[in-house]
Image (tube, rainbow, N blue to C red):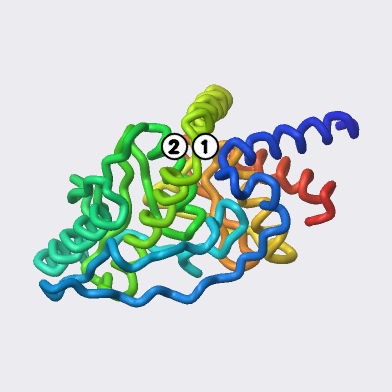
């Protein structure tokens, strides 16, 4: 490829990122450092239950923008055998996650028909699709089905750990979507998603195959490549300097789409002096 082609691809990647990112990040996402904030403690209401709507005054930067992912390792849904072994505990966890999501994000939430997930009703399919990408980059499992967003649940989830993680990540991403994105930008995001889908289906990890890790030289390279992969309609996330991409033999037989995307983004990262 020529230098003109390289420049055109870099400009297109940058344009797509600017469409996806809240306005506050559009001019500084390349320089943002993934520095975590202190974790907010739980607060309790008069009824003795966690007051999920009173915990956060601010949030860490989005992982999509280069901030620290909410989880250092992927938070996954509980396996079916564990759910079947503790049905009462699982129901208790799901009820608390749904209650917390509704209090913290003002979005209706209920148990999903699929074990291991809770379902959140978003205002639009575009919102659900954007939250899906943003939440996966925070290292929390997610799926979207039209206007529904699915988030993980497990009988092993603890109130001040994994339950809080799920509620925090939807509160955080919803905060940025509702409070930092204009109607015009949301329309542009819908157009971008349609454009990407016309070129390639969204590649997500399958339940049986999950994720593949790719070592990067440093955190900055891993962040840059993660975002570059996502704007090519392939879900991605990172753990430290390891980039994770999905393995899905149904939507991406033999991993052709993912491999092509990673190679293309790696080439652009090298041009930028990052890989």
Residue 206: percent from the left, percent from the top?
Answer: 41, 47
Quarter of the picture containing the C terminus is: bottom right
Q: Indicate the secondary structure of the residue bearing disc 2.
A: loop
Choose top left, top right, bottom left or bottom right for residue 7.
top right
Residue 98 vs 187, above or below: the answer is below
Q: Residue furthest right?
A: 3
Q: Which residue is drawn at 52% across and 37% down?
A: 253
Give whichever of 135, 75 is nearer the camera. 135
Circle on res. 48: none
> Is any atom of residue 256 visible in this view?
no
Q: Distance between the residues labelled 2 and 1?
A: 6 Å
Residue 267: percent from the left, percent from the top?
Answer: 78, 45
Quarter of the picture containing the N terminus is: top right
Residue 205 vs 84, above or below: the answer is above
Task: Answer few, some or many: residues within 10 Å of disc 2's Cα (few below 14, many 20 plus, some between 14 and 19).
Answer: few
CB atoms of marks 2 and 1 within 8 Å: yes
Q: Residue at x 72, y 40 (%)?
A: 264
Task: Answer few, some or many: residues within 10 Å of disc 1's Cα (few below 14, many 20 plus, some between 14 and 19).
Answer: few
On the picture, is 237 further left or further right than 56? right
Q: Residue at x 16, y 60 (%)?
A: 95
Q: Which residue is drawn at 48% across and 58% down?
A: 138
Q: Indicate the secondary structure of the residue bearing disc 1.
A: helix
On the picture, is 85 further left or further right than 262? left
Residue 254: percent from the left, percent from the top?
Answer: 55, 40
Q: Report which residue position mark 2 lands on.
A: 250
Give whichever of 230, 17 is nearer the camera. 17
Q: Report which residue position mark 1 lands on.
A: 253
């Amino acid at each position: 490829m020529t230098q003109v082609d390289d420049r055109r691809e870099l400009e297109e990647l940058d344009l797509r990122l600017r469409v996806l990112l809240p306005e506050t990040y559009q001019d500084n996402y390349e320089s943002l450092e993934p520095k975590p904030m202190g974790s907010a403690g739980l607060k309790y209401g008069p009824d003795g239950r966690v007051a999920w709507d009173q915990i956060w005054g601010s949030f860490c930067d989005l992982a999509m923008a280069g901030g620290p992912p909410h989880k250092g390792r992927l938070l996954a849904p509980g396996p079916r055998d564990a759910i079947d072994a503790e049905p009462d505990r699982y129901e208790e966890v799901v009820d608390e996650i749904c209650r917390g999501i509704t209090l913290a994000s003002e979005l209706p939430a209920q148990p999903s028909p699929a074990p291991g997930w809770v379902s959140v009703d978003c205002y639009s399919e575009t919102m659900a699709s954007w939250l899906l990408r943003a939440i996966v980059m925070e290292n929390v499992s997610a799926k979207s089905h039209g206007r529904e967003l699915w988030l993980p649940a497990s009988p092993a989830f603890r109130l001040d750990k994994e339950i809080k993680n799920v509620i925090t990540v939807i509160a955080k991403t919803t905060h940025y979507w509702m409070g930092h994105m204009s109607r015009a930008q949301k329309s542009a995001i819908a157009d971008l998603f349609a454009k990407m889908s016309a070129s390639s289906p969204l590649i997500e990890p399958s339940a049986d195959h999950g994720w593949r890790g790719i070592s990067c030289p440093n955190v900055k390279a891993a962040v840059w490549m993660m975002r570059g992969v996502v704007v090519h309609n392939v879900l991605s996330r990172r753990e430290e300097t390891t980039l994770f991409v999905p393995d899905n033999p149904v939507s991406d037989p033999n991993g052709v789409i993912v491999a092509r995307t990673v190679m293309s983004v790696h080439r652009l990262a090298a041009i930028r002096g990052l890989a």
